[in-house]
Image (tube, coloured by chain):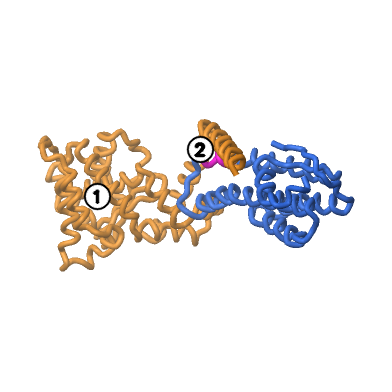
């Protein structure tokens, strides 16, 4: 699920801090934004914009954090509107609904733990790449591969 | 790009597999949700009936109640429906209407009984309302139009304004077309199972759409049950034409006696 890779460059103290903060921002967003699943994405996106002109290491991690929050937004939104339809609309409480909620809890917890771990590792200047998100980020940064 | 696609597919598959796995557990019974909702329904039904009975006059005449009870019991017994769950209330009013409330409360207006040309017509309407109860249409309609949280708060807090809204929704607004059709067709099945001729029920529906002279009389029933002509057509289509061993649940004398008693009360 997580790969640790070596970069050609060694990120400086300030870079490592900024990169780590991109994950901290998404964590704060998740905690502050519950139950609205959009807040974490907005927080991470603002941080991404603020660091758009940063170094490779900072931009790379801001992008990975942003992608992870975007995926989270999609799956959490399904649960959010499903719940709204049950509370205010014609939706019914079904086994499938509860199953989705529990799957989502596992998914969110997993991502939460991974985010904390990545924030810690990135702070030490270690390049941590996630399953899918890391691969996708590398794809977006393919023109800057000479740094790796 | 291929790597991303593979990783995405594996993750999506894992997510769906976990979701599917969890779906195999019966969470509804594990969390006892059905009994929670049935308690809410019980409370809502009683509160709504209490609210209605404050403004309506409920007929409590042994002869009338027993006759209607025997018609209702005949339908429920023939269709394995818990008779004790259906609580019949006969209300004296000049509106032709019958409607179901939560927790099996079935309200029949006296004018409906007086207007019915025979017992089969009345039993058709009763069967239709029992079908709404049995098929859970009442609760579905309330959740859709009022919302689950409001209903739960009304049941626990006894908010009179919301209870009034529930009573109004159930007594004077229509179920959706699909629910009406389902209740009509189920009513035909109930009647046939009870060996009661369903054709007069179809006639009753046709009369609603055709009898423009007494349109105002039927206004409530029409507004709560639209497209009567169409309904009459599909009800007629559903009827088993080969079946002929129909019975009269009460004799003609009892039926006339019922009407005379009601007229005397009026």
The chain letter of the blue chain reads A
The quarter of the rendered structure image containing the C terminus of chain B is bottom left
Residue assigned mark 2: A95
Density class for disc 1 (Cα within 10 Å; few <14, some 14-19, many ≥20) is many
Taking depth in this image into account, of B116 and B202 the one nearest to the observer is: B202
Let me know if residue B255 appears in the view.
Answer: no
Name the image quarter holding residue B186.
top left
Residue A136 lies, in percent from the top left, at: 65, 46
State left or right for residue B250 relative to residue B27.
left
The chain letter of the orange chain reads B
Q: Residue at x 42, y 48 (%)?
A: B139
Cα–Cα gap, marks 2 and 1: 35 Å
Task: Output the chain of dot 2.
Answer: A
Q: Secondary structure at mark 2?
A: helix
Task: Output the chain of dot 1.
Answer: B
The quarter of the rendered structure image containing the N terminus of chain B is top right
The circle on residue A67 is: none
The circle on residue B125 is: 1
**Does B178 appear above or below B95?**
above
Q: Secondary structure at mark 1?
A: helix
Q: Are marks 2 and 1 in contact (CB under 8 Å)?
A: no
The magenta segment: A95-102
Residue B117 lies, in percent from the top left, at: 14, 53
State left or right for residue A144 relative to residue A11.
left
């Amino acid at each position: 699920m997580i790969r640790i890779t070596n970069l050609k460059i060694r990120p400086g103290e300030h870079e490592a801090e900024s990169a780590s903060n991109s994950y901290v921002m998404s964590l704060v967003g998740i905690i502050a934004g519950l139950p609205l699943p959009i807040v974490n994405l907005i927080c991470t996106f603002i941080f991404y914009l603020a660091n758009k002109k940063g170094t490779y290491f900072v931009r790379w991690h801001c992008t990975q954090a942003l992608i992870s929050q975007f995926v989270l937004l999609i799956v959490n939104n399904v649960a959010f509107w499903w719940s709204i339809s049950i509370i205010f609309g014609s939706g019914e409480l079904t086994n499938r609904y509860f199953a989705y909620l529990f799957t989502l809890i596992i998914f969110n917890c997993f991502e939460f733990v991974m985010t904390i771990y990545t924030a810690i590792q990135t702070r030490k200047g270690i390049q941590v790449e996630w399953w899918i998100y890391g691969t996708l980020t590398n794809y977006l940064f393919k023109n800057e591969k000479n740094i790796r | 790009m291929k790597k991303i696609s593979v990783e995405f597919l594996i993750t999506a598959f894992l997510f769906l597999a976990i979701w599917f796995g969890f779906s195999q557990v019966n969470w509804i019974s594990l969390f006892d949700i059905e009994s929670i909702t049935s308690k809410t329904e019980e409370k809502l039904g009683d509160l709504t009936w209490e609210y209605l009975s404050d403004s309506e006059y409920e007929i409590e005449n042994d002869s009338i109640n027993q006759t209607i009870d025997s018609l209702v019991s005949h339908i429920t017994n023939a269709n394995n429906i818990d008779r004790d769950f259906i609580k019949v209330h006969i209300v004296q009013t000049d509106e032709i209407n019958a409607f179901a409330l939560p927790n099996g409360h079935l309200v029949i207006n006296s004018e409906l009984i007086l207007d019915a040309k025979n017992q089969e017509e009345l039993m058709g309407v009763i069967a239709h309302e029992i079908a709404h109860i049995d098929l859970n249409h009442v609760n579905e309609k309330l959740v859709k139009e009022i919302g689950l949280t409001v209903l739960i708060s009304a049941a626990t807090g006894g908010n009179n304004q919301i209870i009034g809204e529930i009573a109004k929704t159930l007594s004077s607004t229509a179920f959706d077309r699909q629910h009406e059709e389902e209740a009509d067709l189920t009513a035909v099945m109930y009647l046939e199972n009870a060996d009661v001729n369903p054709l007069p029920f179809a006639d009753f529906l046709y009369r609603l759409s055709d009898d423009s002279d007494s349109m105002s009389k039927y206004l409530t029933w029409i507004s709560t049950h639209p497209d009567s002509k169409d309904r009459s057509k599909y009800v007629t289509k559903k009827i088993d034409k080969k079946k002929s061993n129909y019975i009269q649940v009460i004799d003609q004398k009892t039926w006339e006696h019922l009407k005379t008693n009601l007229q005397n009360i009026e």
